[in-house]
Image (cartoon, rainbow, N blue to C red):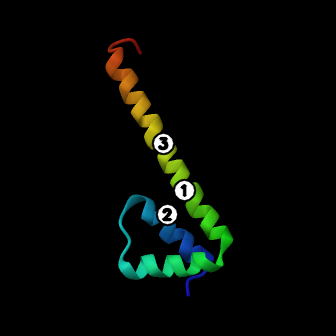
């Protein structure tokens, strides 16, 4: 079984790329028993969505007011 350090490394990797089936399963098994890693994964997903939303807002502002920055 993975320890928390290994799990958080895979969770971080998961934010940028697809994990292998083995990696996905081992992360999920660890998270069934570890509240801290579940919280870490939840926070990573929240931050990713927030950054994507901010980038979308920036892009729409840039498109609606060209040359005014």
The residue that label 1 is drawn on is 44
Q: Are marks 2 and 1 in contact (CB under 8 Å)?
A: yes
Q: Is residue 32 above or below residue 17?
A: below
**Mark 3–mark 2 CB contact (< 8 Å):** no
Residue drawn where x is 48% and y is 47% of the image = 49
Q: Please count the marks in the image.
A: 3
Outermost residue toward the top in this view: 68
Distance from the alpha carbon under mark 3 to that under mark 2: 15 Å
Q: Is residue 11 above or below residue 6?
A: above
The mark found on residue 12 in the picture is 2
Q: Which residue is mark 3?
A: 51
Which one is earlier in the sequence, the residue at label 3 or at label 1?
1
Which of 6 and 56 lies nearest the eye of the viewer?
A: 56
Q: Position of residue 35 (x, y in %)?
A: 67, 71
**Secondary element at tag 2:** helix
Sooner in the amino-acid sequence: mark 2 or mark 1 = 2
Residue 20 horizontal side relative to residue 32, left or right = left
Tell whether 28 sits left or right of 35. left
The N terminus lies in quadrant: bottom right
Q: Quadrant of residue 43?
A: bottom right
Work out whether 14 lies above or below 25.
above
């Amino acid at each position: 079984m993975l320890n928390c350090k290994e799990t958080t490394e895979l969770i971080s990797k998961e934010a940028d790329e697809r994990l292998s089936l083995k990696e996905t399963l081992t992360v999920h098994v660890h998270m069934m028993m570890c509240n801290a890693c579940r919280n870490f994964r939840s926070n990573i997903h929240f931050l990713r969505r927030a950054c994507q939303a901010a980038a979308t807002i920036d892009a729409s502002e840039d498109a609606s007011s060209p040359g005014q920055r």
